[in-house]
């Protein structure tokens, strides 16, 4: 790397190779807080990041790029993947932050438009965690230019913004000039928006996602995962491997499925944060549209809480896993329920209704009713409740019991220890409507269960429903 010299001091810009099994890379910088001048910048490159990008690329791009359908990538392909990761880290050394909102500015259907996406890229910033275009389908015939991340418009603009000499007389004049530049640039090209680093519960600014609609993008992603599952034994086959590859990549499929679920969950009780400058129109904070949140719940009821049989192929599972603990699919389902019944979700829904008014937001009452309609759909259809569904219903109960207990006692030891937090993360208290809504919801659910149970013919289903009704009765005491 080139050697720089200033005031007699020699400073190196270094790419450090770290022989470690840690699957990561990083690109920090040390800067002068008075001027912003970068004093030191280097990239740390762990060897095992190559395993990370291999697994990402096989699972996300395998349906579209035949080069990804093997456990050992060509030097050409691995070189492309290394360039993508190192470009992101170079961005950090130059002072760029993550821009997790950039990917949300691309309409989902454009991600399947071969001409458009190969010309413009699937994300407008290399600094987003929008790895590969998992929305594209095999029939779209999109090439690597529309699959791989690239340095794009936001990155070039941000570097220009950060490094252009303003010649301002003082800091105040400098702020006025660069602020006007931001406002004017965004007005001319909204795709230059900086959406933050994904820590503000804004559903548009999440890691690993892409497109302007998490539900549509995730449906396409799951469709591709089904393609991967159908070919996994073939793609992972190596002589004398003893199913190690198959186990590794099956877990990567489940992990990717979980990512899609998290993207959708992130739209529930989401608050949009759009930083405004004085005089700009519009609110800085606004709840995610009600229809978007309802679409998220409908997706989860279908893609998560209805048993995902495509992930449960016995011929595959019997080769890679001993059934002695909770399975990967059940673990994801339980985790999803826990997030949907968390303090953050209930608090945010409650506070949004307080601030923006009844009828203008997704109320907590309507939210839990929509969840119940999907999770306990057998109460209306009369269908037998199979074993995965019985677990889902128990997970839901447990989540509501925990939230009810916290709302009536004002206790959540883990969350209390993590203070200070954002307001929506603070434990629910006895002063809110959360507890009364949950209590009434559980009472009504118990009544519906007891009304339906006598007509249920399947023995396991009936015993399960009676058990659930009794658990609710005990919890409400």
Image (spheres, rainbow, N blue to C red):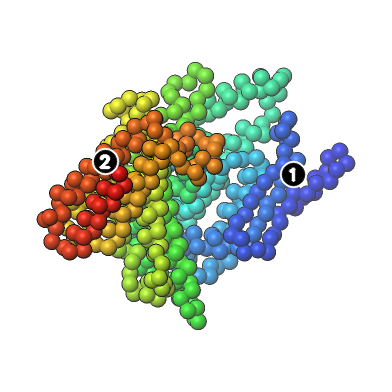
Residue 475 rendering spot, x and y as whole percentages: 31, 47
Label 2, label 1: how far apart the Cα atoms are: 57 Å
What residue do we see at 69% from left, 22% from top?
171
Residue 4 rendering spot, x and y as whole percentages: 80, 45
For residue 441, which quarter of the picture?
Answer: top left
The single residue placed furthest to the right in the displayed view is: 8
Q: Pick the residue in front: 247 or 165.
A: 247
Res 426 visible: yes
Res 102 visible: no
**Quick one: SS at disc 1?**
strand
In the displayed structure, would residue 455 be above or below residue 28?
Answer: below
In the displayed structure, would residue 50 be above or below residue 35?
Answer: below
What residue do we see at 36% from left, 26% from top?
354
Q: Which mark is residue 266?
A: none
| Image quadrant where one finds the C terminus | top left
Q: Pick the residue in front: 327 or 254.
A: 327
Instruction: Report if the CB atoms under discs 2 and 1 are less than 8 Å apart.
Output: no
The single residue placed furthest to the left in the displayed view is: 455
What residue do we see at 85% from left, 43% from top?
9
For label 2, the residue is: 441
For label 1, the residue is: 40
> Which is nearer the N-term, disc 2 or disc 1?
1
- Specify whether 140 is left or right of 130: left
What residue do we see at 47% from left, 53% from top?
132
- Specify whether 389 is left or right of 256: left
For residue 82, which quarter of the picture?
Answer: bottom right
């Amino acid at each position: 790397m080139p050697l720089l010299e200033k005031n007699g001091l020699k400073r190196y810009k270094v790419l450090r190779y770290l022989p470690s099994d840690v699957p990561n890379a990083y690109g920090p910088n040390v800067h002068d807080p008075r001027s912003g001048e970068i004093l030191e910048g280097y990239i740390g490159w762990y060897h095992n990041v190559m395993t990370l990008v291999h697994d990402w690329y096989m699972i996300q791009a395998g349906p579209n790029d035949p080069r990804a359908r093997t456990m050992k990538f060509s030097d050409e392909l691995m070189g492309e993947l290394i360039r993508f990761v190192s470009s992101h880290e170079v961005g950090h050394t130059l002072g760029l932050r993550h821009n997790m909102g950039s990917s949300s500015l691309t309409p989902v259907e454009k991600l399947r438009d071969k001409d458009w996406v190969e010309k413009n890229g699937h994300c407008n910033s290399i600094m987003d965690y929008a790895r590969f275009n998992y929305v594209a389908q095999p029939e779209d015939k999109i090439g690597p230019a529309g699959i791989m991340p690239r340095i794009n418009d936001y990155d070039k603009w941000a570097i220009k913004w950060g490094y252009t000499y303003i010649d301002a007389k003082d800091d105040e004049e400098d702020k006025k000039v660069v602020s006007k530049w931001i406002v004017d640039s965004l007005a001319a090209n909204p795709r230059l928006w900086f959406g933050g680093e994904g820590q503000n519960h804004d559903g548009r600014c999440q890691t690993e996602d892409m497109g302007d609609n998490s539900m549509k993008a995730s449906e396409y992603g799951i469709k591709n995962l089904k393609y991967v599952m159908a070919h996994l034994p073939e793609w992972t086959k190596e002589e004398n491997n003893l199913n190690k590859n198959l186990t590794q990549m099956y877990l990567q499929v489940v992990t990717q499925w979980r990512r899609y679920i998290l993207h959708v969950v992130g739209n529930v009780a989401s608050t949009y944060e759009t930083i405004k400058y004085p005089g700009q129109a519009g609110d800085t904070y606004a709840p995610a549209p009600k229809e978007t949140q309802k679409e998220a719940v409908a997706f989860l009821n279908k893609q998560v809480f209805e048993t995902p049989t495509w992930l449960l192929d016995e011929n595959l599972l019997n080769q890679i896993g001993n059934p002695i603990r909770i399975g990967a699919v059940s673990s994801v389902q339980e985790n999803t329920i826990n997030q949907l019944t968390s303090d953050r979700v209930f608090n945010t829904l409650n506070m949004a209704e307080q601030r923006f008014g009844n009828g203008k937001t997704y109320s907590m009452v309507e939210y839990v009713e929509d969840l119940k309609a999907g999770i306990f759909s057998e109460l209306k259809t009369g269908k037998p409740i199979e074993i995965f569904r019985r677990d889902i219903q128990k997970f839901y109960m447990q989540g509501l019991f925990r939230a009810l207990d916290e709302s009536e006692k004002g206790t959540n030891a883990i969350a209390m220890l993590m203070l200070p937090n954002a307001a929506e993360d603070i434990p629910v208290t006895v002063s809110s409507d959360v507890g009364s809504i949950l209590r009434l919801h559980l009472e009504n659910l118990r009544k519906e269960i007891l009304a339906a149970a006598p007509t249920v013919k399947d023995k396991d289903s009936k015993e399960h429903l009676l058990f659930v009704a009794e658990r609710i009765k005990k919890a409400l005491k």
